[in-house]
Amino acid sequence: MRVIDENTITDAALEQMSSTPNQRLKEIMASLVRHLHGFAREVDLTPDEWLQAIKFLTAVGQKCTEHRQEFILLSDTLGLSALVNALHDKRGTESATKSSLLGPFYRHDAPMMKLGDSIISKSKGTEIAFYGQVVDTNGKGIPNALVQIWEPDETGNYDLQLHDPSEMDLRGCFHCDSEGRYYFRGLCPTGYMIPMDGPVGDMIRAQKRHGYRPAHIHFVIGAPGYRELVTALYINGDPHLESDTVFGVSQSLVVTVNKKDDKSPLPHLASLRYDFKLAATKDQTSGRVGADPSQIIGKAAH
């Protein structure tokens, strides 16, 4: 009979998993076990510390609902989401706009709107115009590309955090015109602190981190034959650009709001312009590092 101790347990576990028929699952689980066991040995994990970790992960799961995804928030704040995002970008075969995190507040059922409409229904912040063009890697506009947008309100809260979930605010979907151009009205983006009323917030405080995200607005942009782009635009001058709690900022995504812009389709408003570049692909696999919380809960239930 094999002697199980702190050194032999890893090989014993890997041996039991060796018959896994799904080769990708086998690869992932074997690596996970090796790293997890190595971590426990490296820090000389105690039973009490192990139990505290179990309690923490249990609390993270208990905080999840169809309107809140605490596990995605945990992944974001540990930098895992940003890492997975970077690995996904690396697989691209063409240069495109840098991606960013989907985050825990995306909703798949935002209303379809007409170009020029406002995504504001409840909020009272400063309205500005957002506009630009969705192009391919040669700079040619992509007709009818779908642009999905969401952002927090002037207090730094998303609609999922404030309202009846059936009442959406600061979300919308737009189809670009025949030349790939888009424009809409929304709030001037604001920064905010991530939800701190759960176990992830407890972790952030224990680590003496500030918990803030810089001012930003989210985009998901797609068109048939192109790699879906999940990204966000960050406002220049925000004090947390260099220390985003979820590591989502890239320099190429930092933009400046123009107080006067005669080229804007809505020149009476301050504006933010950005042109998004999509890479062609035959693979329609999602690159979303995040999901609508209700879809995760629904899938888990089945």
Image (tube, grey):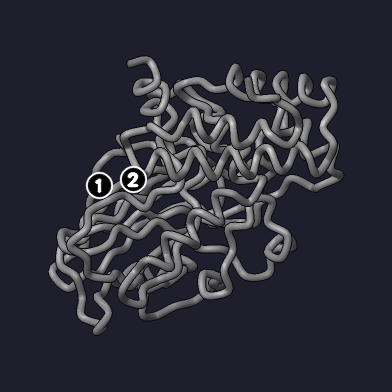
SS at mark 2? Answer: strand
Picture quadrant of residue 145: bottom left
Q: From the viewer's perspective, is 42 left or right of 287?
A: right
SS at mark 1? Answer: loop
Which mark, by number, is residue 113? 1
Q: Is residue 30 above or below residue 149?
A: above
At 77% from the left and 19% from the top, the residue drawn is 51
| Residue closer to the observer: 206 or 110 | 206
| Residue closer to the observer: 64 or 165 | 64
Picture quadrant of residue 269: bottom left
Amino acid type, callout 1: Met
Q: Quadrant of the N terminus?
A: top right
> Residue 237 placed where, x, y %?
68, 69
| Residue closer to the observer: 62 or 242 | 62
At 24% from the left and 43% from the top, the residue drawn is 112
* Marks 1 & 2, CB-CB < 8 Å contact: yes
> Residue 26 placed where, x, y %?
42, 39
Q: Residues within 10 Å of mark 2 (few under 14, many from 20)?
A: many
Q: Residues within 10 Å of mark 1 (few under 14, many from 20)?
A: some
Picture quadrant of residue 290: top left
At 51% from the left and 41% from the top, the residue drawn is 30
Q: Earlier in the sequence, mark 1 or mark 2?
A: 1
Q: From the viewer's perspective, is 270 left or right of 211?
A: left
Amino acid type, callout 2: Gly
Observer able to see residue 191: no
Which mark, by number, is residue 250? none
Q: Which residue is mark 2?
A: 172
